[in-house]
Image (tube, grey):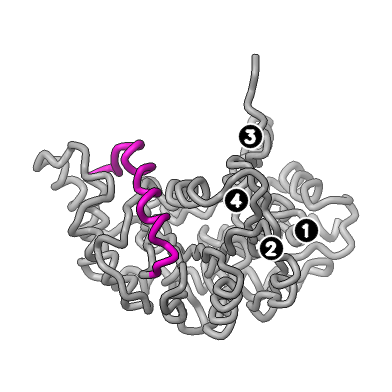
């Protein structure tokens, strides 16, 4: 039977690799799962007031379809949050989605036609390339200096063509932890303006920052065609509840998109209403749990980066945000990063993700691991990785 050619290009290495882990477990080996960036799975739960808000919404009968754009009170609070990062927007500039992934697909499907090109930071979060391919586009990777957290501006300029429609940014970045500074963001906005391109900026990890103050793209956006993607899965520890949002900057260049993209929101009806009330509480309630969460994650980052850089044959830049390390495999005797990750899993029971799953051009010869588990689990996993590399 026929299968659409479009779906063939869809990949998600982070979850695809789990199939191999299940086979290892079936043989009786314990597996350390360092592949999925879900803080809730590692014991970081949303605070009780947020859980209670969800329960209360259900008990009060808030179980019907919300407006397709999302609960107005929530959109108002989201706008306030984004305005503290530099934007100047209102509730009507926000569209609530079922996670950032839905928001990303809505944006990509609204701007990409067959043969269009979208620039992605190399390496990148896999759904960016998958959605571009799904809608007939071509993902183009641009270089990023992982040590200094800076985009290669000249490389970007070289890769812009008459077919380019957008530049995507992910800051803090998944899988590298790179965080772009204000100067880099300003340069990227200028390039986009010069070439009449959309700027899609994913800031889902915006408060998970370790060493420097986070600068959102809103601070340098002015009246540029900037679209911010964000949500509640990471910072607000609500991953399984699937809620995110699109924020449109005030720009006349976005007028047609703002008119047409919401049609996709209406087609899919609405976002989960009780969860919207929980998200509202997560913005209005105490925020101290975020500081504690980030403090715990920083300890884990420091341990993992130190241990990785002590292993001959591996080198790892210091992630500035999010909760991922992206070490490079020097002189890989297995030939490919995917083979390295597979053999590590089969021999030591440590599940990571091959770097080429985040873009072959700049992700190859790397692997990604999540440093969300306990310090004890991470220390043990680093020992297993060291034994594997040295064997």
- Of residues 13 and 263, which is closer to you in this image? 263
Nearer mark to the viewer, of 2 and 4: 2
Q: Which residue, given by chain and number where applicable, does mark 1 sit on?
A: 361
Q: Which residue, given by chain and number where applicable, does mark 4 sit on?
A: 35
For the residues labelled 2 and 1, say whether their Cβ atoms are less than 8 Å apart: yes
In the image, what residue occupies the spot 63% across and 42% down?
136
Please tell me whether mark 2 sits on a helix, a strand or a loop. Answer: strand
Work out whether residue 166 can be spotted. Answer: yes
- Of residues 299 and 76, which is closer to you in this image? 76
The dot on residue 122 is 2
From the viewer's perspective, tell me whether residue 245 is left or right of residue 68.
Answer: right
Q: Which residue, given by chain and number where applicable, does mark 3 sit on?
A: 6
For the residues labelled 2 and 3, say whether their Cβ atoms are less than 8 Å apart: no
Q: How far, Cα to Cα, is label 1 from label 3?
A: 22 Å
Please tell me whether mark 3 sits on a helix, a strand or a loop. Answer: helix
Q: How far, Cα to Cα, is label 3 from label 4?
A: 26 Å
Residue 100 at x, y = what percent? 44, 53
- Classify 14 as above or below 258: above
Please tell me whether mark 1 sits on a helix, a strand or a loop. Answer: helix
Residue found at the very far left of the displayed protein? 60
Considering only order in the chain, which callout, 3 or 2, is on the residue closer to the N terminus?
A: 3
Report the quarter where the C terminus lies.
Answer: bottom right
Nearer mark to the viewer, of 2 and 3: 3
Considering only order in the chain, which callout, 4 or 3, is on the residue closer to the N terminus?
A: 3
From the viewer's perspective, tell me whether residue 98 is left or right of residue 163.
Answer: left
Residue 332 at x, y = what percent? 87, 58
Considering only order in the chain, which callout, 3 or 1, is on the residue closer to the N terminus?
A: 3
For the residues labelled 1 and 4, say whether their Cβ atoms are less than 8 Å apart: no
Which residues fall within the magenta stretch? 251-273
Name the quadrant containing residue 10: top right
Nearer mark to the viewer, of 3 and 4: 3
């Amino acid at each position: 039977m026929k299968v659409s050619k479009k779906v063939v290009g869809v990949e998600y290495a982070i979850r695809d690799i789990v199939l191999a882990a299940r086979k290892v477990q079936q043989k009786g080996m314990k597996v350390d799962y360092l592949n999925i960036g879900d803080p809730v799975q590692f014991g970081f739960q949303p605070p009780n007031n947020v859980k209670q808000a969800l329960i209360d919404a259900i008990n009060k009968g808030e179980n019907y379809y919300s407006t397709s754009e999302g609960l107005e009170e929530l959109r108002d609070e989201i706008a306030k949050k984004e305005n503290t990062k530099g934007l100047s927007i209102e509730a009507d500039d926000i569209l609530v989605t079922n996670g950032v992934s839905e928001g990303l697909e809505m944006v990509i499907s609204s701007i990409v036609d067959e043969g269009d090109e979208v620039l992605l930071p190399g390496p990148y979060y896999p759904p960016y390339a998958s959605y571009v391919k799904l809608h007939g586009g071509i993902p183009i990777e641009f270089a990023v200096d992982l040590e200094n957290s800076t985009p290669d501006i000249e490389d970007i300029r070289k890769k812009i063509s008459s077919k380019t429609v957008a530049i995507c940014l992910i800051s803090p970045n998944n899988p590298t932890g790179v965080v772009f500074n204000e100067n880099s963001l300003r340069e990227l906005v200028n390039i986009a303006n010069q070439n009449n391109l959309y700027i899609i900026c994913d800031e889902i990890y915006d408060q998970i920052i370790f060493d420097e103050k986070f600068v959102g793209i809103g601070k340098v956006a002015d009246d540029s065609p900037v679209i911010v993607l964000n949500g509640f899965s990471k910072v607000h520890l609500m991953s399984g509840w699937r809620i995110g949002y699109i924020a449109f900057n005030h720009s006349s260049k976005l007028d047609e998109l703002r008119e047409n993209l919401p049609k996709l929101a209406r087609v899919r009806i609405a976002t989960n209403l009780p969860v919207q009330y929980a998200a509202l509480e997560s913005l209005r309630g105490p925020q101290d749990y975020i500081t504690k969460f980030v403090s715990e994650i920083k300890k884990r980052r420091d341990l993992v980066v130190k241990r990785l850089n002590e292993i001959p044959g591996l080198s790892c830049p210091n992630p500035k945000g999010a909760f991922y390390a992206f070490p490079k495999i020097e002189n890989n005797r297995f030939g490919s990063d995917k083979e390295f990750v597979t053999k590590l899993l089969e021999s030591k029971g440590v599940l990571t993700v091959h770097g080429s799953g985040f873009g072959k051009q700049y992700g190859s010869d790397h692997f990604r691991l999540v440093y969300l588990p306990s310090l004890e689990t991470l220390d043990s996993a680093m020992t297993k990785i060291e034994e594997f590399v040295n064997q």
